[in-house]
Amino acid sequence: MATVIPYNRELAFEYGASQRLSPLVRRVIARNPSAFTFHGTGTYIVGPASGSGAVAIVDPGPDLPEHIDAVLDAVRGETVSHILVTHTHLDHSPATVAVKAATGAPSYAFGPHGRGGDGGQVEEGADFDFVPDHRLADGESVEGDGWTVEGVHTPGHTSNHMCFALKEENALFPGDHVMGWSTTVVSPPDGDMRAYMASLEKLQGRSEGIYYPTHGAPITDPSPYVAALLAHRHEREEQIIACLADGVGRIPDMVARMYADIDPGLHRAAGRSVLAHLIHMVETGRAGCEGKPGPDTAYRPAD
């Protein structure tokens, strides 16, 4: 029986409004809905809204003036000490420039966007202009007044993806690594399925009791949810093995069979994740092909 992922696609919100989710967490959602961003990018503000003390902004969001204004309005009269960026996609990091200019706060992230093995552009939607003021290492923390955030490097969706753990509330900001409304696209070469699955296992070993993804509602029971995501990825690999055994060796044909129940408009993105799985499976001897694995390669069962 296929794993049932307990998605939550319910979300009560108002675009541009600052919504308090906990004593230390507020959220402002950008009006950039799409098939990949759900209702839009959720920018989080970490710290008490007391008018004094330092707060952090997590994922400033896209370069949309109305969203940037809403975020700055939400912290008006407060000191922004840190801008934390989970990763460098155009719906997460570009507003950093404007928020930094308005607040003077430096940015923190694992690093700039990866460029893959050939040094060229690796995907649509990447923010190659972003370079953090400070590179945050896995396990390294930053602090404000009454809050401590630890960086948790979780490569896979992108090589520079980092979650942020809020110690005082045992909470995690997982960016796009874990989302409550959908699975995550892993698009090679910067996206890496082996790394993504290892990063899911890494989160399984942590104790946070609530996740605040950049898209969608909070995940209030994250441990079984992450386990379901990981089981789902293993099932996708079993589906690929079944395709290969039946002589279905091209990615578009695999996608048509494996994703027959989803919108065909999403098949291209699904194909990128199937490619990521196949690269991982060829590397680990569970599938074969001639030459280097790629989107147009013919695949076969393992030798």
Image: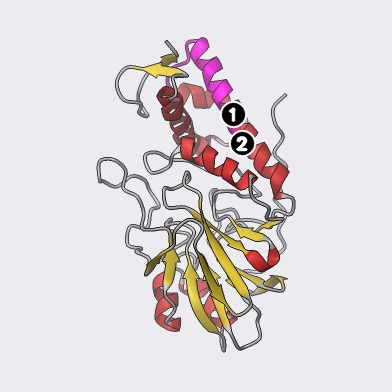
| Render colour scheme | secondary structure
Q: Is residue 146 visible?
A: yes
For the residue carrying disc 1, how many other residues have a C-alpha within 10 Å: few (<14), some (14-19), or many (20+)? some
**Which sits in the foreground, 258 or 106?**
106
Residue 243 is covered by the magenta coloring? yes
Residue 43 visible from this viewpoint: no
In the image, 184: left or right of 192? right
Residue 135: quarter of image: bottom left
The residue tagged 2 is: 230
Q: Is residue 233 above or below residue 23?
A: above
- Measure the alpha-carbon separation of dots 1 and 2: 6 Å
Q: Which residues are the magenta region?
A: 233-250
Q: Main secondary structure of the magenta part?
A: helix
Report the disc number at residue 234.
1
Which amino acid lies under the numbered mark 1 shown in the image of this protein? His
Q: Is residue 7 magenta?
A: no
What residue is rendered at 57% in x and 66% in y? Answer: 149
Q: In the drawing, does residue 192 fall left or right of residue 211?
A: left
Residue displayed at 47% across by 52% down: 161
Query: Which of the image's four quarters has the N terminus?
Result: top right
Looking at the image, residue 175 lies above or below residue 196: below
Query: Does 105 sit above or below residue 3?
Result: below
Q: Locate residue 114, reporting x and y percent.
A: 35, 50
Residue 95 horizontal/vertical position (percent): 44, 69
- Dots 1 and 2: beta carbons under 8 Å? yes
Examine the image and state in which quarter residue 20 appears.
bottom right
Amino acid type at circle 2 is: Leu
Q: Residue at x 44, y 58 (%)?
A: 137
